[in-house]
Image: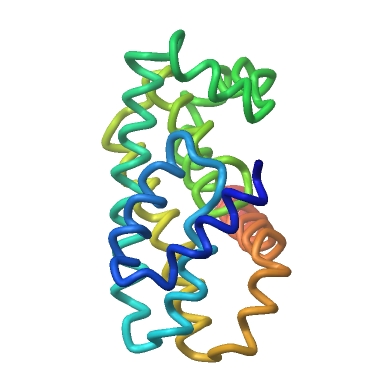
Amino acid sequence: MFRSLYNWTMGLAAHPHALLALGFIAFIESSVFPIPPDILIIPMVLAARDQAWKIALVATIASVLGGMFGYGIGAFLFESIGQPIIEFYGKTEYLEDFRTRYNDWGAWIVFIAGVTPFPYKVITIASGFFELNFTVFSISSLGARGLRFFFVAGLLWYFGQPIRIFIEKYLNILATIFCILLIGGFVALKYLL
């Protein structure tokens, strides 16, 4: 199933309405769809490097709007839609753990999920379910998704085709390392100041 979804998504990159397809994929990926928009961003930027920033912007805006939709699922439709999605991704056991941490770390949880390989849709739904402040959620989502998509587009714009293989192979690891360093920096500042 995932292979056919992946192939379908890759085929969209060559379509004349690829930006609309990217916006659609980025939107639904933030609430239900399993394939991240990065796989559309990569071939689109490589095909039109002068459009890299526009492509990243479309992905960011659509992803944040999709995240808001996921928030709504968590807030209003958790039992009927949200819970089955979280169960599908095997993240049910994380819900109770998140509940205890959301009051203090909600913005960071959203940010980290928006940048790393953790399924962002799980966090968007959980944010609505746990009633994380909507403004905090939106700002964290915008920062995280913008950072992720502009970083990928920027690397592709600067390095071109050679970086594609590197990104596809190491994107999840690079995003995780970045978040570890970011959090480590904030923890260090907290204890040093």
Q: Which residue appears at 38% of the width and 26% of the height?
A: 132
Q: How is the image coloured?
A: rainbow
Tell me: residue 130, above or below residue 179.
above
> Which of the pair 16/159 is nearer the observer?
16
| Residue 97: % across, % down | 64, 20
Which quarter of the image is occupied by the N terminus? top right
| Residue 173: % across, % down | 72, 61
Q: Which residue appears at 29% of the width and 66% of the height?
A: 17
Q: How many marks?
A: 0
| Residue 25: % across, % down | 41, 51
- The image quadrant of residue 75 is top left
Q: Which residue appears at 42% of the width and 55% of the height?
A: 145
- The image quadrant of residue 91 is top right
* Residue farthest along the top direction in this orientation: 79
- The image quadrant of residue 113 is top right
In this picture, residue 94 sits left or right of residue 113:
right
Tell me: residue 53, above or below residue 192.
below
In this picture, residue 12 sits left or right of residue 66:
right
